[in-house]
Amino acid sequence: MIHWEAREAAKRVLERCDLLGALSESPDSLCRTFLSPPMREVHKLLLEWMREAGLTAHLDAVGNVRGRLEGIRSSTLVVGSHVDTVPDAGKYDGVLGVLLGIEIARVASQTRPHHSLEIIAFSEEEGVRFGFPFIGSSAVSGSFDPAWLTKVDAAGITLEKSLVQFGLDPLEIPGACIPSSKLLSYFEIHIEQGPVLESLDAPLGVVTGLVGQSRHTLEFSGRAAHAGTTPMNLRRDPLPAAAEFVLEVERLAQNTEGLTATVGRLETVPGAGNVIAGIVKLSLDVRHASDVVRLLSVSKLLESSRHIADTRGLKCSIIGNLEQNAVPCDLAQSSRLVGAVLHGGLTVHRLPSGAGHDAMTFAPLCPVTMLFIRSPGGISHNPLESVLESDVENALEVGATFVCDILEDASA
Ligand code: HGY
Ligand code: MN
Ligand code: MN
């Protein structure tokens, strides 16, 4: 059993979550998107904390912060999560898993392990700035698509320019990759972000798999006109069409077992109270454990958007931003994680993840395992997001046992 002060480490992790939670693009809420200005201070602190924990640390070409512990062999266990956030975020989503990884590395670095360990703070997982997720982990896993460099954010800045403006070199992106031959395994600790563990009164959960997700942007366009002088029968108003579509999204999800479908963002142009909208843009996020059900649901919804537009004499354009298949966690390694949970004197709960995580990017290349920490109130993507200090302490004990077990497994 590892001899360390898990209680003291848990305190340190939560203090650091508070510190990072104050580094935001907005003064009165937490929002920290890909390579935004507050990320510089986040990088500085993470590099310092990784080095202080005994790791050699650097910032890579897409803004991931990476701390490495060289083992006897270069086969690498990656332990990571993300440091970007959604708007008006909680301060544990992603960040907690990175800080737990640094504490676990502090324990592992007490000896030279058989395999190498790399703790990674991924620069972009939420997909807020450029509309698609996993930029950071894609660069590490080698699936970064150079065509992404021309994608633009809301201000019209390309991904390429955002890297250069931050002082990074897009030409270095291939160098951020860990060759799959060197990828031993991927492990992520993350808050559950849902109500299951709390309903079971369980501090931790072993993740069985991650549901697949599809993300689209839809645009209904009609004709902007004067709200006062345009008779109702002469309008081509895209907003009621969007409203009809949003209700169809809700209806389909409520009537399809295990499906979640969400319109989280809706924007009207020009967006004035006395102007009939000309354009309405909205997001569509569809998820299900079965890829067949998800893809069938998406095609039904996109078909209904076209039908709604046709019957109202409007245009409807659709952009696909993400198609991510469901990902199973590795059975053999998850059973070792179960062993670590039992070793910690805790009961084992297995559950699927309704949220996407960087683990999905590594799943095609190496075994992935995830450990969930209870989310009080099941709240996340909300400033009310929280964790219990005792659960964090349990996660540290279990995570360290599991990581040291994998690192010392010469048969792997
Ligand atoms: O949206 C998600 O599933 C995750 O929080 N990025
Ligand atoms: Mn999130
Ligand atoms: Mn997350």
Image (cartoon, helix red, strand yellow):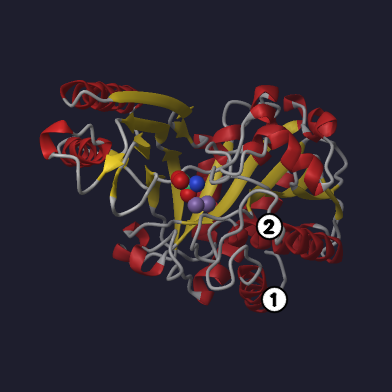
Would you name the residue on which mark 1 appears?
5
Q: Residue at x 66, y 28 (%)?
A: 150
Horizontally, is 25 left or right of 379 in the view?
right
Q: Which mark is residue 115?
A: none
Q: Does residue 335 appear in this view?
A: yes
Among the two numbered marks 2 and 1 on one chain, the one whose residue lies closer to the N terminus: 1
Q: Residues within 10 Å of mark 1 (few under 14, many from 20)?
A: few
Q: Residue at x 26, y 35 (%)?
A: 238
In three-dimensional space, the C-alpha distance between marks 2 and 1, rounded to whole angstroms, equals 15 Å
Q: Secondary structure at mark 2?
A: helix
Q: Residues within 10 Å of mark 2 (few under 14, many from 20)?
A: many
Say which of 404 and 69 sits in front: 69
Residue 277 location in percent, x, y? 31, 41
Residue 363 location in percent, x, y? 57, 31
Image-quadrant location for residue 251: top left
Farthest residue, direction left: 233
Image-quadrant location for residue 364: top right
Say which of 326 and 341 sits in front: 326
Image-quadrant location for residue 200: bottom left
Say which of 343 and 320 sits in front: 320
Q: Which mark is residue 101?
A: 2
Q: Is residue 272 above or below residue 127?
A: below
Q: Residue at x 61, y 69 (%)?
A: 21
